[in-house]
């Protein structure tokens, strides 16, 4: 039985708990919160064997095979380093870190020590993402040249979204999905990036528009917002047609159209528990093979996404306290 421990007991941890409880050969083993009562209540609700009132206690437990980090972005570096210091394999929720410097440091430690580390950007692991990519590459839409991806929810009242000390803003919370959709579909050969954003009174981006231009002339237009609901669609266009994905955050359906806008075919995602199970399976497989990363989201692409987001924030004048702290001291 593969035992998973969760650091943090918020809403995203709940989704992971539901997921692993429905997976065979995976045990919801331990959960940790800064408040023992909260951890105990979580453990009781979701059937965890252990509840800890500190994160340190969990990472010191020799029975934990993988730690899922589900704390705010600004704390990821500290908590991932804690796991690596105790030899624990880690699956860290997106956005991976607050900035690229932190990401580079934890990746370096992971590779030096030979300890598995992965970013929990769940769309990267979904088999349906591979299906969509295969359609794009198959010639069904001709030569792919234009892409758009939108993600928005009216969540600007959430504390984690508006506080820079928590790594807030639409980019790290929502825009990361649009960026990953573009990189999955069009790759990483970028020539330049242009963008604009609207900031909150606290100095984080509440909505943004990003254009990626590729070396071969392809363009990806990306939008994310914490101010309103968007269509959540991802659309890849070619000279013979286009494919429309219903939700870049968890695609369940994709529709293929020809150049005359006639529906050619509908693709549906396989049945899933929550969608989180694919990243858990990928981690278990990689750990079993003694690897420090997974091919679904290799360290190099995790770092690239962080570097792109750093560049965007810099151009917008969006700064986090973590940006002023040397990673080793975070």
Image: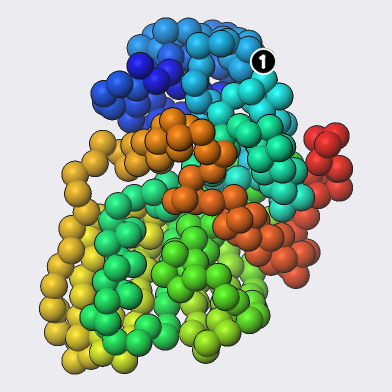
Pick the residue in front: 2 or 258: 2
Residue 185 higher or lower than 68, as above or below: below
Residue at 30 percent across and 21 percent down: it is 25
Q: Position of residue 87 (x, y in %)?
A: 64, 23
The C terminus lies in quadrant: top right
Question: Does residue 67 appear anywhere in the picture?
Answer: yes
Q: Is 112 situated left or right of 42 in this image? A: right
Front residue of this view, candidates 209 and 114: 114
Q: Residue at x 27, y 82 (%)?
A: 139
Mark 1 residue element: helix
> Which residue is located at x 57 percent, y 64 percent?
207
In the rendered image, is residue 18 in sight?
A: no
Q: In the rendering, at what x and y percent does residue 187 appear?
A: 49, 70
Quadrant for the N terminus in the image: top left
> In which quarter of the view is residue 315 placed?
bottom right
Which of the 4 image quarters holds residue 213? Answer: bottom right
Image: 82 above or below 156: above
Q: Is residue 302 above or below residue 91?
A: below
- Other-residue count near label 1 (Cα within 10 Å), few / some / many at <14 / 14–19 / ≥20: some
Residue 262 lies left or right of residue 158; in this view the side is: left
Vertically, is 49 above or below 90? Answer: above
Residue located 57% across and 39% down the image: 292
Question: To which residue does mark 1 refer?
Answer: 56
Q: Position of residue 81 (x, y in %)?
A: 70, 31
């Amino acid at each position: 039985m593969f035992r998973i421990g969760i650091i943090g007991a918020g809403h995203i941890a709940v989704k992971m708990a539901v997921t692993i409880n429905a997976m065979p050969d995976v045990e919801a083993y331990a959960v940790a919160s800064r408040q023992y009562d909260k951890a105990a209540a979580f453990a009781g609700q979701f059937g965890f064997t252990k509840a800890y009132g500190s994160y340190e206690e969990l990472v010191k437990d020799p029975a934990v095979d993988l730690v899922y980090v589900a704390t705010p972005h600004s704390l990821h570096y500290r908590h991932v380093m804690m796991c690596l210091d105790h030899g624990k394999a880690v699956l860290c929720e997106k956005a991976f870190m607050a900035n690229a410097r932190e990401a580079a440091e934890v990746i370096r430690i992971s590779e030096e020590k030979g300890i598995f580390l992965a970013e929990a950007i769940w769309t990267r692991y979904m088999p349906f993402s591979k299906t969509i990519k295969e359609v794009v590459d198959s010639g069904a839409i001709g030569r792919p040249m234009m892409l758009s991806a939108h993600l928005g929810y009216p969540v600007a009242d959430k504390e984690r979204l508006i506080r820079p000390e928590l790594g807030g803003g639409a980019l790290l919370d929502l825009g990361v999905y649009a960026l990953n959709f573009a990189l999955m579909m069009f790759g990483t050969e970028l020539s330049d990036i242009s963008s604009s954003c609207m900031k909150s009174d606290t100095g984080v981006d509440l909505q943004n528009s990003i254009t990626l231009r590729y070396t071969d002339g392809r363009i990806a237009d990306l939008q994310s917002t914490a101010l309103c609901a968007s269509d959540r669609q991802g659309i890849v266009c070619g000279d013979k047609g286009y494919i429309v994905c219903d939700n870049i955050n968890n695609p369940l359906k994709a529709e293929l159209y020809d150049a005359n806008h006639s529906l050619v075919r509908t693709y549906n995602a396989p049945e899933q528990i929550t969608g989180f199970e694919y990243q858990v399976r990928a981690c278990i497989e990689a750990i079993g093979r003694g690897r420090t990363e997974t091919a679904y989201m290799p360290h190099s692409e995790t770092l690239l996404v962080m570097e792109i987001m750093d560049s965007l924030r810099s151009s917008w004048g969006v700064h986090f306290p973590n940006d002023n702290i040397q990673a080793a001291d975070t």
